[in-house]
Amino acid sequence: MTAALPTFSVIIPVFNGARTLARAIDSVLNQAASAHEIIVVDDASTDATPGIAKAYGGKIRSLRFERNQGVSAARNHGARAATGSWLAFLDADDWYFPDRIKAHLQWISEDPELDFLTADYEYQDANGKSLGRSLEQHAAGRSLLDRAKADDRAVMEVDLFEAFVADHFGDTHTLSLPKASFDRLGGYPLGFKVCEDVHFLTRLVARSRRVGVICRPLGVYVVHNNSATRRDPVAAQVENVRTLKALKRLAPAFSPAVRRGVKTRVRIGRLNLAYALHKAGRRVDAIRAVLPSLIESPSLASVRDLLSIVRG
């Protein structure tokens, strides 16, 4: 008996995304391989978002929260409602390239033993200017680019899991995973404003053996000058470290490679917080931000982090 082809439910969480939501939806509707369904989850928007979603009629499923609950809750709500066998996600200010679903669908059909799939993606500013690609910015990503065959595919196994977690060069809008796997993990973590995607992806990696990576861009991640990270970098980095510390508490259950990746990710998160504090003129707080890494796990890297902050 021939196995049934995977079906994709694409979930788009949105909060006050009237300016960009149509572009995101259209990028899914215009896929070379059609999605099984598009689920837009409106997280209590107060702008024109509900009307934009409504205008698509039966082309999408539209869900709405009456009280803002955050992006993790919105993604989880969409996932619970999904009827496809695989899930894909897209934030309302980003978009897919036309072969995003087709590239993953074909590979899953050929190799059903893949635990999940991800892909390269392009960074753009709000004016559409390219700011580079994800994979080329990290050593492990460049290694995958070198491995990729003529069809731009590379299988990532445990030898790269540590770097994948530490560098986070796979993002939400290029992630595809079985709905059953999402359900087993319990979805995205609630109560976190920053880095919730790293939290989820790390837990997914910890349960995986083989990951399919399309080594060409399948979507666009838009970098906004008015994002929360840029408006208040200290607050954003505080939240980042808080999420990573919660992830670290789960790390004893992970494989050694993933545990090491989490350890590095926490150290880097603390260093980024220290940079933000130092730039804000809070030098003592900056030193305090990186000290825990040196105390918990003395290493040459943690010493360098401390010295970089002390020296300014």
Image (cartoon, helix red, strand yellow):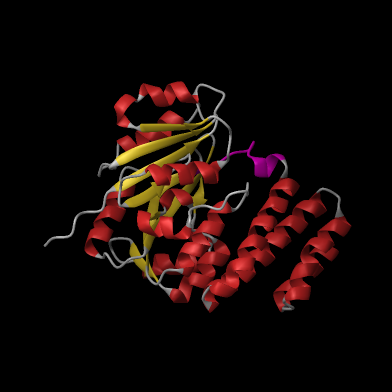
Residue at 82% across, 48% down: 280
Residue 216 located within the stretch drawn in magenta? no
Q: Quadrant of residue 111?
A: bottom left
**Residue at image location 62% in from the left, 48% down from the top:** 191
Where does residue 65 sit, x and y in percent of width and height?
A: 51, 33
Query: What residue do we see at 64% from left, 61% from top?
Result: 246
Q: Residue furthest left?
A: 1
Q: Quadrant of the C terminus?
A: bottom right
What is the count of numbered marks? 0
User: In which quadrant is the N terminus drawn?
Assistant: bottom left
* Foreground residue among 304 and 30: 30
Residue 210 position (above or below residue 73):
below
**Viewed as shown, does residue 120 lie left or right of 302?**
left
Residue 85 picture location, percent across and down: 30, 52
Q: Is residue 160 above or below residue 183?
A: below
**Percent from the top left, x then y, of residue 297?**
72, 76
Q: Nearer the viewer, residue 269 or 246?
A: 246
Q: Which residue is at the front of the view, 4 or 234?
A: 4
Residue shown at the point (64%, 56%) measured from the top left: 243
The answer to whether residue 224 is magenta is yes
**Does any portion of residue 303 appear in the rendered image?**
no
Magenta-tinted stretch: 221-231
- Location of residue 149 in the rendering, given as x and y in whole percent from the top left corner: 30, 66
Can residue 151 be seen here? The reply is: yes
Q: Residue furthest right?
A: 284
